[in-house]
Image: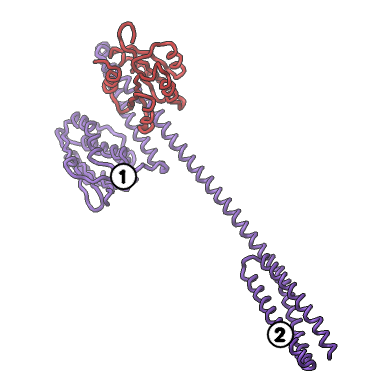
Chain colours: A red, B purple
Amino acid sequence: MNPNNKKTVFLLEDDESFAIVFARWLKERGYEVKLARSEEEARKHLQKIEPPSLFWFDYYLGEQKTVEELLKMLHENERFKSIPIIIVSITVDMQKLGELKKYGNIEVFSKLLTNREEILQAVDRMTGNRN
Amino acid sequence: METIRTLILITGWPILIGGSIFLVYRSLKFYRDVGKIIWGKVVLLMVVGWLVSMYSLGITATAYMFDNVRNGVIVVLPIFFVWFITMVTITWAVLRWSKEAVTLSAFYRGLEELVKVRTQELKKAFEVQIEREKEIRRLQEQFVFIAAHELRTPVTAIEWGIRTMLEDEEFRKSLPEDYLRLLENLQEKNENLINLVADLLNVARLRNKHLPPEMEKVSLKEVLNEIKETVNTEAQKMKVRISWSALDRELPLVKAHTISLKEILTNLIVNAIRYNKPEGWVIVDAFSGPSGLTMEVKDGGIGMDDKEMEKLFGEFYRIKNDQTRNIEGTGLGLFICKELLERMQGKIWVNSSKGEGTTFSFSLPTYES
């Protein structure tokens, strides 16, 4: 949380278009957004910022890298392990993504099959935000 | 006569005993060298037989000689010759055949070893081939996966970007009319592109025979319930009524791939909606029979003639006439349905009448059939 009492969402998205769209959705919904465009950038930010209310991650981060290492790191960190996580992905292998639930309170959405309202409702629910 | 008798007695027995020992030794060695083949057993039997008969004769002849020297010598001498000749013959045979048998045995053993080595080499080559096939399969899966991701990411980003802009009232009001129309047009075109990418990726997967679908026990009613909302949205847009008669029936489980089945049903029902008349109807029904479960998607739409039906399941085929000109599609949907069904041991067929409607039917094996 920040001094304006707005809840914060930490958004990790390597695609600029999706980053703009998601950030806009969240701001219009009343959230503060911290944006990182790569895993390295995300790790640097996380060392400095207060824990957010929610993590929103793209699963694939370019060059066939996934967000799994970061999930593991967050799960092992006392500051971040209890923060809910939304994962949004183009190609969703539900079995694989189901295995990610061992890293905490995680919900998965497909960029192809989900709509804006569905994801934002999940964000509200997971952050305890009434909208 | 006494001298001859003595000579026979003191030389005959030592020769017999010495010869016997030598023969037994060579025969045993021969048997060991030749191994378990029948020839070794035959030779040993021969030697044993000879020993028994010669010793019997020898004992008889010796007894005879002590009883009547003159007659004894007359009888014993020929016997002694027979001994000698047979002993030499058998010894020669054992020695001679022993060599050949050992060579043959060594040859066979060599052959056995060669067969073992070649079998191992074949096995290894086969394992290498299997690994290669697995690697090819992995690379093909990876390619399809990467292609799916890399193609879908930009078109989805465009879709969401344009949609987000168009959902912003202030932004819409700020745009000139023609730019607004342009954005809406781009969104439509992009949706077509998304569908085309999806269909092409499906076709790529289908062509890749190394990626067979995983068959499961599937409830058709559950699948229908899952796609109902998506399809109903399309039906409402086109003002078409859908009756889900299949949901009121008791249906057995089918052997199918869930995602493929969803795709087939969505394709067929959305086609029935799009190729329909205003305020038209669609019936989704199913019934089971001895050969499995049959699903029907029936509509009272524009229908088609026999010529159009013939090419219907071909790649990129679309019916072209005044009524279908404005209906969107890639021409791959029915081709994909047919391929997916065939891979699930099912089949698809169509009945239609121009101007009166169309019924698409497909069958799938059940767990009872």
Q: Quadrant of the N terminus of chain B?
A: bottom right
Relative placement, left or right, of B195 versus B45 is left
Instruction: Give x and y (percent) for residue B71.
Output: 77, 93
Which residue is at the front of the view, B36 or A16? B36
Residue under label 1, please give it: B341
Q: Residue at x 38, y 43 (%)?
A: B212
Query: Residue B312 falls in which quadrant of the image?
Result: top left
Query: Residue B157 falls in which quadrant of the image?
Result: top left
Q: Chain of mark 2?
A: B
Secondary structure beneath label 1 = helix
Relative placement, left or right, of B231 versus B140 is left
Q: Residue at x 59, y 55 (%)?
A: B116
Q: Amino acid at mark 2?
A: Leu
Secondary structure beneath label 2 = helix
Q: Is residue B147 visible?
A: yes
Q: Chain of mark 1?
A: B
Residue under label 2, please give it: B57
Q: Residue at x 32, y 48 (%)?
A: B345
Determine whether A31 is above or below B331 in the image.
above
Instruction: Give x and y (percent) for residue B67.
Output: 76, 91
Determine whether B43 is above or below B337 in the image.
below
Which of pointers 2 and 1 lies earlier in the amino acid sequence?
Answer: 2
Q: Residue at x 75, y 76 (%)?
A: B17
Marks 2, 1 in one chain: yes
Q: Pick out the residue farthest to the front.
A: B67
Q: Amino acid at mark 1?
A: Leu
Which residue is at the front of the view, B162 or A55? A55
